């Protein structure tokens, strides 16, 4: 079955693109299959990608603010990442008067670059397989004792490193705990905003085009790493100087062709490629649909008001984008899992495994029992976590409740209080109590109607009526610190918060009787008693079994090249530039162009407007050296690289290790690749390096930045 699928896929696409990687692959940089990469066209050695002792490409690739990836493209620490990765920084410097989200921002020199307190970048300076050290002595122990020993062993491994103050060592499990790797990390903290195109370029197509190809988005922004006089990490200071990297990426302006080798180097967040079929089926039919349904309601509510009011649009831009992003991804995932028959494929694979090793049947039977028993609790968890995430009132209440618990137990110190006030001020800064009450009213109604009574607080059926909910919430707000007093002070929220937290006793007293806090506490308690413990106890068993199953798959399927699921550590994925044939008689080319931006142009539209200057450049064909042989500027392109969330901002490199694109998305038909990579449909989407330089040069006229870069014509 699997073999047949593979042959079929090879027939559907031109021979030049036959896929070496049936299951995709996100490889630990010290363990890449150099031979295969070279067969596919790579011209450099694997050592050029990651060498712990010499400058290599890894010295130009960083994790950006704990989530995205970014890369250094000049000897002065100039950093390239996605517009959507720098989005909240761009937003935080924006106001109605100076709206950098709408108009873009371009520093004219280093002095004009904007500081971003709290933003960090991480370099990976060493990777070591420490499985033997971490797992030592755990073989015969039960789960709990093994976990304790692993924690102790990890500490021991960490203590063998001599660290400078800005360094840390993270030890991360791979293959579900069958292996462990230690990562030596250097963190830089003075990261300044250098440039960003307007959203009509950087987020062109916005949510309609998100996760979709053909795509026409200039999803990039520029930052710069600053260091102290010794090139070492330092807190922000005006005396800091641009960081001098060990390596930076040259940028290639050569035309791209289908079938060209490419690799992507970055920090993929999370994948689950080795689940049993029952788990995939639960995601497809229960968990994803539940989460999608909550977000659909809140997004619709936010959207209506954001379209009507510019201030709301700015306030909620980042929040909306982040909720919309996974809402859409999950729908694509469900569709893709269905279309690629992920469950059927897994079931067939399980049969072949059992045929080779009958013990695996016991494992799979046990999975079936556990996932079935866990099902209702997992569903409750999905709904519960989504309503808290989608309602700012409930999110706020959860912070206050944590605070209250600490206050009561006498465990509050100055630092903890500060972290609460910071977190709360950040939420209040972009909080509209009335709008959020509408969202909360609606999702609580959904919650009340979707869940069986045994999962709801007593009497919660009354919350099925959203109009009544809204009245209730508005009434609550009048007597609430959570959504009322502090929140209503708007721009001065952080001052209000500070005053509020000065008097610990009266704050605690007021919170005790806060109706919004009480509502949250009731929901929290009922989730806790009905589902949380049961969910977790099943999950512990599932996790332990997944470790066994992972080891069994690796021991049984000798022909398969296994790679560890993504876990936000540095990985290399490689493939070829390729279009696709996602539906019968539908073919996507591998590349889009500026003329396609103009085809999508809808004047004044909030998603498809095009800035006048770009329209003019297109009309005058003022493309400089950035057009293809065809005479059009390439905008986005796709390849077979296996990427996921966290790979945003990752460099796409050519056979020589030059930057040719900036990863920012995947195409709709392939987003199930987090669970079931399918070479027929799974494509990553990148901004063409030519488009980035075209915008920096022709649109922004930021020649001083081009002068820093090494551009290969
Ligand atoms: N889908 C991409 C990713 O997962 C881009 C998200 C940002 N863009 C947007 N329109 N929300 O992060
Ligand atoms: N846009 C995603 C991110 O922010 C990358 C796209 C994907 O999930 O592949 O990481």
Image: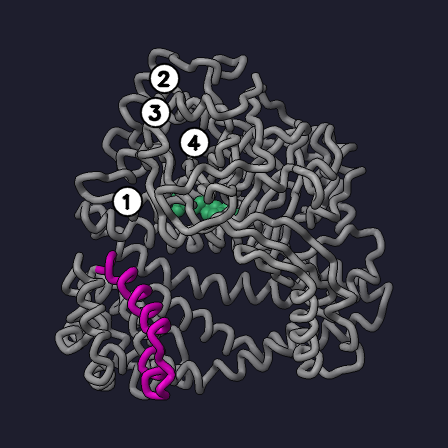
- Which comes before the other along the chain, label 2 or label 4? 4
Mark 3 or mark 2: name the one nearer the start of the chain. Answer: 2
Which residue sits at x=30%, y=17%?
A: 616
Given contact means CB atoms under 8 Å apart, are the residues at marks 3 and 1 in contact?
no
- Separation of residues labelled 2 and 4 (CA atoms): 14 Å
Asked if residue 667 can be seen in this view, the reply is: no
Q: Considering the numbered disc 1 on the image, is that residue within a helix, a strand or a loop?
A: loop
How packed mark 1 is, by other alpha carbons closer than 10 Å (few <14, some 14-19, many 20 or more), is some
Q: CA distance from mark 3 to mark 1?
A: 18 Å
Q: Nearer the viewer, residue 338 or 256?
A: 256
Disc number lying in front (3 or 2): 3
Judged from the image, the secondary structure of the residue bearing numbered disc 3 is loop
Residue at mark 3 to residue at mark 4: CA–CA distance? 18 Å
| Direction from residue 248 to residue 218 in the image, left or right | left
Q: Are marks 1 and 2 in contact (CB under 8 Å)?
A: no
Q: Is residue 304 above or below residue 162?
A: above
Q: Residue at x 48, y 55 (%)?
A: 330
Q: Which residues are magenta?
A: 402-431
Q: Position of residue 394 (x, y in %)?
A: 30, 71
Q: Which mark is residue 621?
A: none
User: Label 4: which residue?
Assistant: 216
Q: Which residue is mark 1?
A: 93
* Dots 2, 4 in contact, CB < 8 A: no
Q: Which mark is residue 700?
A: 3
How far, Cα to Cα, is label 1 from label 2?
30 Å
Asked whether residue 255 is in view, the answer is yes
Closer to viewer: mark 3 or mark 4: 3
Residue at image location 65% in from the left, 43% down from the top: 573
Percent x, y for residue 133?
76, 68
Query: Mark 1 vs mark 4: which is more N-terminal?
Result: 1
Residue behind mark 2: 618
């Amino acid at each position: 079955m699997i073999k047949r699928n593979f042959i079929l896929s090879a027939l559907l696409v031109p021979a030049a693109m036959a896929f070496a990687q049936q299951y995709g692959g996100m490889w630990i940089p010290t363990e890449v299959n150099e031979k295969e990469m070279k067969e596919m066209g790579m011209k450099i050695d694997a050592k050029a990608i990651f060498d712990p002792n010499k400058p290599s490409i890894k010295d130009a690739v960083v994790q950006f603010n704990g989530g995205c990836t970014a890369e250094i493209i000049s000897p002065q620490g100039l950093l390239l990442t996605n517009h959507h990765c720098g989005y909240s920084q761009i937003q935080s410097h924006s106001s109605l008067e100076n709206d950098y989200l709408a108009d873009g921002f371009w520093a004219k020199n280093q002095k004009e670059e904007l500081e971003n307190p709290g933003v960090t970048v991480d370099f990976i300076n060493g990777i070591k397989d420490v499985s033997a050290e971490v797992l030592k002595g755990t073989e015969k122990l039960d789960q709990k004792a093994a976990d304790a020993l692993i924690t102790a062993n990890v500490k021991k491994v960490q203590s063998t490193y001599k660290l400078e103050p800005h360094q840390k060592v993270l030890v991360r499990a791979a293959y579900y705990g069958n292996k462990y790797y230690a990562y030596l990390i250097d963190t830089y903290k003075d990261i300044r905003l250098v440039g960003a195109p307007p959203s009509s370029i950087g987020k062109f197509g916005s949510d309609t085009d998100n996760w979709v190809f053909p795509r026409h988005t200039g999803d990039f922004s520029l930052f710069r790493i600053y260091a102290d006089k010794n090139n070492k990490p330092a807190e922000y200071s005006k005396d800091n100087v641009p960081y001098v990297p060990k390596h930076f990426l040259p940028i290639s302006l050569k035309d791209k062709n289908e079938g060209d080798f490419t690799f992507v180097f970055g920090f993929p967040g999370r994948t689950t490629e080795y689940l049993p079929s029952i788990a995939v089926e639960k995601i497809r039919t229960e968990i994803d649909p539940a989460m999608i349904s909550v977000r659909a309601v809140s997004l619709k509510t936010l959207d209506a008001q954001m379209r009507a009011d510019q201030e709301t649009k700015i306030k909620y831009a980042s929040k909306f984008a982040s909720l919309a992003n996974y809402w859409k991804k999950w729908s694509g995932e469900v569709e893709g899992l269905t279309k690629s028959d992920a469950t059927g494929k897994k079931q067939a694979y399980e049969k072949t495994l059992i045929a080779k090793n009958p013990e695996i049947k016991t494992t799979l039977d046990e999975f079936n029992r556990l996932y079935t028993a866990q099902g209702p609790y997992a569903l409750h968890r999905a709904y519960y976590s989504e309503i808290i995430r989608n309602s700012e009132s409930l999110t706020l209440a959860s912070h206050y409740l944590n605070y209250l618990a600490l206050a009561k137990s006498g465990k509050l110190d100055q630092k903890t209080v500060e972290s609460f006030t910071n977190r709360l001020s950040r939420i209040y800064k972009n909080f509209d109590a009335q709008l959020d009450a509408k969202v909360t009213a609606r999702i609580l109604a959904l919650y009340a109607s979707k869940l069986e009574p045994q999962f709801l607080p007593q009497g919660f059926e009354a919350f099925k009526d959203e109009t009544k909910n809204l009245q209730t919430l508005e009434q609550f707000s009048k007597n609430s610190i959570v959504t009322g007093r502090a929140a209503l002070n708007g721009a001065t929220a952080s001052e209000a918060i500070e005053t509020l937290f000065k008097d610990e006793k009266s704050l605690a007293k007021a919170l005790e009787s806060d109706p919004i806090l009480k509502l949250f506490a009731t929901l929290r308690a009922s989730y806790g008693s009905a589902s949380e413990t049961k969910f977790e106890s099943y999950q512990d068993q599932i996790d332990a079994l997944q470790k066994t199953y992972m080891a069994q798959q690796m021991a049984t399927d000798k022909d398969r090249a296994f790679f560890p699921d993504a876990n936000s550590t540095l990985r290399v994925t490689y493939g070829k530039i390729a279009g696709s044939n996602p539906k019968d008689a539908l073919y996507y080319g591998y590349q889009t162009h500026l003329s396609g931006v103009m085809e999508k142009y809808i004047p004044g539209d909030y998603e498809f407007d095009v800035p006048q200057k770009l329209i003019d450049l297109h009309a005058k064909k003022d493309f400089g050296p950035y057009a293809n042989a065809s005479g059009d500027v390439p905008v986005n392109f796709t390849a077979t690289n296996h990427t996921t969330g966290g790979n945003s901002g990752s460099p796409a490199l050519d056979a020589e290790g030059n930057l040719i694109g900036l990863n920012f998305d995947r195409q709709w038909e392939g987003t199930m690749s987090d669970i079931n990579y399918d070479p027929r449909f799974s494509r990553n989407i990148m901004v063409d390096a030519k488009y980035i330089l075209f915008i920096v040069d022709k649109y922004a006229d930021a020649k001083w930045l081009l002068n820093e870069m090494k551009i290969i014509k």
